[in-house]
Image: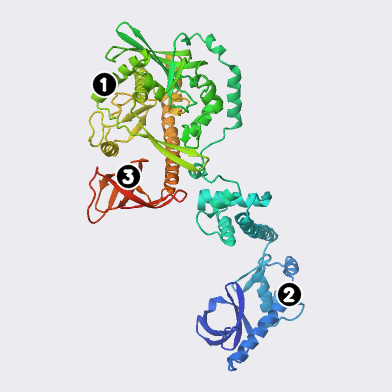
Amino acid sequence: MATVGKLIEYLDSGKFLCAYITGAQAKRLRLINQNGREMNLPLSRVVHCSEKNHSVELPREELTRQLQETAETRKCLMEQINLQEIWELTSDEPSDTFQPAFLAELSFGKDADDDIVAAFLRSVFMDRLFFKYKENKVIAHSAEQVEQLRNQREKEERIQALIAMGAEFLKKVHSSKRDLEIGSNGEECLAIIRDFYIAGADSKHADIARKILKAAGFNRPHDPFHLLVKAGIWDANENIPLLRNNLPVVFPLLGIQQAEMLLQQGVDKLFQDPARKDFTNLRPMTIDGPTTLDFDDAVTVEQQGENFLVGIHISDVAHYVRPEDPLFIEAMQRGISIYFPEGQIPMLPRHLSQGICSLIQGELRAALSFMILLSDEAEVLKLRIFPSIIKVARRLTYEEADSLIKTDPELAILNDLRRKLRNKRLDAGALLLPFPDVNIHIHDGTKVQVSLADTDTPSRTLISEMMILANTQAARYVADRMAPGLFRAQKPPRKRVVHGLDNDLFLNSKQRKMLSRGELLINAQPHSGLGVTQYTTVTSPIRRLLDLVMQHQIHSLVRREEIRFTEEMCKDFTSVIGRTLARANNVRQQRHRYWLLKYLEARKGQPHNALVLESGPKRTFLLLTDILLNIDLPTPTRNRPEPGCRISVKLTRVDALDNTLRFEW
């Protein structure tokens, strides 16, 4: 019983302490412990209470000395205790629950005094493998429990060793001035902190990663990133959003094997398809950027009396990639090709996207040709769709096409039709809202240059109008046959501030915020932004799953075969495409912002031109006009800027890795 004069033991931060009871209440004790400290202790925290009474009327120093001497005695007695031997002896007992004094006597082979019992209990608490202490009794673990606890202990010991090794390794990585030999242990450590930096608390070994970093003294959020860069695991501008979203980058073996097999087939078999039209007599042209390698589309035009036969020839990816193929399944995982300033992640392997499916000048290629007869006023008179064989005769860049557009007969006709097609869409309520392209160029992996390119040039809008024409006619073709498909739709804007063609950056920015959200449906609906009654996309099957799916659907209709995808399958595609596009766009936007911030890092402290978009009571929203980046600032109390005005703001802080950006007025 815990009364005044008893010597007790209790645990404090995992350490046993001896103390005398100097005062006792029902549930609390007044103590002086072996460190000479007087304190109150809940009765429930007492592990052992002596049978013997002690005088507590002695001086504090003497009481402290006695307690320290007792603690040392018990510590020495612990060295004589072999818990495993005692545990093995208890296995013959009918019960697994024992009095501490009984087991202490077994251990020492004699009557157990207070010191022996306390030493035994200390051993049980220090080594919990064989016994546990509960409600003043000692319970022996079963053989199965011991095995489980032993395995757990070994695992914990390995973890502690890994933490110690990992911390030392990270210190070496940080201080190394040359290539460091990593080894298998180093690789394991780097893999753990890599996963932790990418997934945070959701990573498999988040707790171990935190402990390794803490032990090594790396406590800042981006320390793992810099260590991985220094170890040569990551590039200095590693695409972290890509890793965090776990987007597929490498193609699976089955997909690569299919792509290589398709390359070996060649194109000669195309002529054996009776439904495939030989259009090699035509002279298609591609018009793209100077660095384009995956050519989806080519155009032709010929005058027929007062009308014009426009050919919009799209790479026939569906001929090569069937729904049951590994490459189609992989395309469903990717959804779209993603383009970054430093490279791209294609939806299809480069064997196809830049090879056999790309409409390369001078090469025979499978195509799906939309032959559209237009009147002189660009009215659609007739549509015919053919699986075809084409050979691109001319490859032009946008700049080359712009320079030839008035003198080249074909380009001149297409340009005239382009203007009329665009005006028809504008009359139907289309919103063009042209915005310059932000082109980011990276030199030597570090130096970033940003330039703006006009998207409203004649050649760019020529191709744009031809693709909109083909996509609109494809949607009508499928819808008129009551077939399910994938259709893009958009309701009218919530408010209209732009009418007709307007190149005003402020008004176009304002109008964009008032647009209704685009929808992906299985039945055709109007698309307000484009000014058409139905719309889909079929013109980029190399880089978009939606276009590939619709190409298959059109093939089955043109060839009068069983419809390729049912309504239920199309519903599933809307979910797949919505999910993959959202993920891909999120990564692309984050990466785009990263490179713009890298560009700004070299321009800290400099003034930057900005357009005021909104000026609210608390925040003012602006657009940096040189790089088209949105920012916001606290609205000044005086001289509040007016929306639409252009001002200069000062860059005070920027960190691309941390995604922080701060400006001042």
Numbered disc in front, either 1 or 3: 3
- Tag 3 residue: 609
Q: x, y percentage for residue 162?
A: 65, 57
- Tag 1 residue: 424
| Residue 97 in view (yes/no) | no
- Dot 3: within a 10 Å radius of its alpha carbon, few (fewer than 14), some, or many (20 or more) residues? some
Residue appearing at x 38%, y 52% in the figure: 605
What is the C-alpha distance between the residues marked 2 and 3?
77 Å
The numbered mark at residue 295 is none
Between residues 61 and 225, which one lies in front from this camera angle?
A: 225
Q: Above or below — where is 212 with respect to 466?
A: below
Q: Secondary structure at mark 1?
A: helix
Three-letter amino acid code of the residue under disc 2 = Glu
- Tag 2 residue: 79
Q: x, y percentage for residue 28?
A: 51, 81
Numbered disc in front, either 1 or 2: 1
What is the C-alpha distance between the residues marked 1 and 3?
36 Å
Q: x, y percentage for residue 132?
A: 64, 68
